[in-house]
Image (cartoon, rainbow, N blue to C red):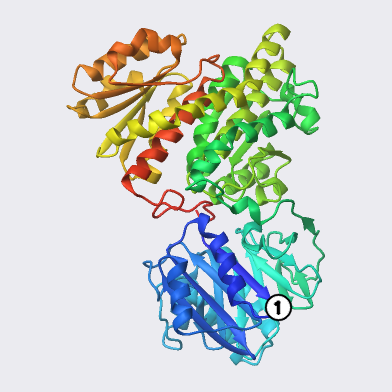
Amino acid sequence: MCGIIGIAGRSLVTDRLIDGLKRLEYRGYDSSGIAVLTDGSLDRRRAEGKIRHLEATISKNALDGQIGIAHTRWATHGVPNTTNAHPHRAGRVAVVHNGIIENYLELREELSGKREFLSETDTEVVAHLVDVELAKGLSPRDAFAETLKRLKGAYAFGLIIDDNPNEIFCARAGSPLALGIGPDGKEHFLGSDAMAMAQLTSKLIYLEEGDWAILRPDGYEIFDETDVPVTREITVIKGGPAVAEKGKYPHFMLKEIYEQPDILTRTLTHYLDNQRTRPVRGTELAPALDFTKFDRVILIACGTAYYAGAVAKYWFEQVAGLAVDIDVASEFRYRRPVLNERSLFIAISQSGETADTLAALRYCKENGLTTAALVNVMTSTMAREADIAMPIHAGPEIGVASTKAFTAQLTALAALCLSAAQVRGTISDEELLRLTAELISVPRLISDALELDAPIAEMSKTLAPARSAFYLGRGAQVPVAFEGALKIKEIAYIHAEGYAAGELKHGPIALIEDGTPVIVLAPMDDLYEKTVSNLQEVASRGARVTLVTDAAGAKSGAAMADELIVVPSSDPFIAPLMTTVAMQLLAYHTAVALGTDVDQPRNLAKSVTVE
């Protein structure tokens, strides 16, 4: 989603603001801009498209100062162009904004005839409201505070005021925002996430819901939603700018695919006992995580994280005997689900800020459920608000299309499933040890799966010209088929659909014709024969079939497929992780063959912080 960076400094800020924007590119954007105070006078530059266009604009018409704000915009209100780019200005005020002002039309109507609006955005109304309050004679502090009281929706703001040379005003409600403390305490920073400030500071303060603040070069003040001064904890972030470098890889996505063996080892370390023989019991992770007290798990997520939950549904029900409901977060609240206190709610989100998932978490808390957040960012809003915060330890994921976060989510969920089975008595000790050993083997097996990189790159050349493709699976491979189809849509822009293979005859098979690519996920398991029968149905109608299987499946089904992707042989319990890696590589190399922007696909954002 949109990105914010601000600096209240003692030296010039433009170059550092631009560097911060570049570190926010992974979030997805379609325009960018910067505003600074030079000797107290406000000036700004904006540009459509990539940050390099903003740099070109600044090179032609320079600006710099010691106080500044900058923004990458992902369009919500109004088309992507320079006029709609942030910062927006009205009179003395310039503002950058992440989120949505839900009552902006009402506010804009109120100002109609009194104020000239130049953009189509909801954000511009905020600049006008603050400027109106300033015109009444209010101080900058009071003008900002009064404006916040009139806004409904989700927002994170950074705001500067002409002839007010030493202050940045900021606020958050429903959209994340952090303050940064300079190494010598003589500069202070503002960012929509830690990555924006990675080269500036390691000391952050995460604003809480409803907080607003004033930044100055030599200090800061924080207020809660009732305008009472408050103190918030300082968090020291480990890791530095190097985490955002591609290194030897041409794209962040490929780097993150290759990081998975190391990442999943880290994930497992958190969820297995010191002897790495069995999962830690849930209560060892958090006292509230007692699986004997629950008879139902509710998994809520969006996009790729939703498919991780869909795989986990098979695991929890088959291994732990625990009923699972899984919902798309954007629909969950609106169907008014029946809830009870013996349900455990688990939100799954890489960022921990996904707006719909966060809203679902709050809904369940209000209804008295025990809530957990499985996240990659332990300082995120979900991690702070849930009763139980569970990390996946994937590290910063820059590519918009999730890879290592997805497999880390799967790995953590598999360990939680075994923990639930252990305490609920649905699994023998022998079987628990066996499945734990299988889970421990995942990093090694994924390392082996990465040896498929070159042959899959070659296969992708036959998929690249396709206008449409189908991904089929059965059992826990169905969500992996959905995820494979999502990946090819996200980064290669090929229309693709994932299906439960048994659903083919209920309509989708009508779309199969000569040359239609069909990717069939069928490692050898109890459902292999049934899946292969579906493979034969599409092959007989002219489909070009790629069979993704293991050695045993290849031996049996090679003659029926046009192409084979043979993943490492593994227990069915962990097989979804093996086929996932193959789907990631197929999508990546197809996108490369088509020349798309792999790390920043069009129209997409890394963290969706608006509903």
> What is the quadrant of residue 531 in the picture?
top left
Q: Is residue 402 left or right of residue 539?
A: right
In the rendered image, residue 265, in percent from the top left (x then y), is placed at: 67, 30
Above-or-below relation of 602 to 569: below
In the rendered image, residue 23, in percent from the top left (x then y), is placed at: 57, 60
Q: Is residue 420 left or right of residue 356?
A: right
Which of these two is toward me, 214 or 61? 61
Above-or-below relation of 130 to 381: below
In the rendered image, residue 493, in percent from the top left (x then y), is placed at: 33, 45
Which of these two is toward me, 446 or 141? 446
Q: Which element is circle 1 on?
A: loop
Which residue is tagged 1?
Answer: 9
Above-or-below relation of 506 to 360: above
Residue drawn where x is 39% and y is 28% of the image = 455
> What is the quadrant of residue 554 in the picture?
top left
- Identity of the amino acid at label 1? Gly
Above-or-below relation of 275 to 218: above
Residue drawn where x is 21% and y is 29% of the image = 511
> What is the quadrant of residue 452 in the picture?
top left
Q: How crowded is mark 1: few (under 14 residues within 10 Å), some or many (20 or more)?
A: many
* Circle count: 1
Residue 577 seen in render: yes
Residue drawn where x is 29% and y is 39% of the image = 464
Residue 426 seen in render: no
In the rendered image, residue 42, in percent from the top left (x then y), is placed at: 57, 87
- Residue extending furthest toward the front: 248
Residue drawn where x is 63% and y is 71% of the image = 6
Q: Is residue 257 left or right of residue 173?
A: left
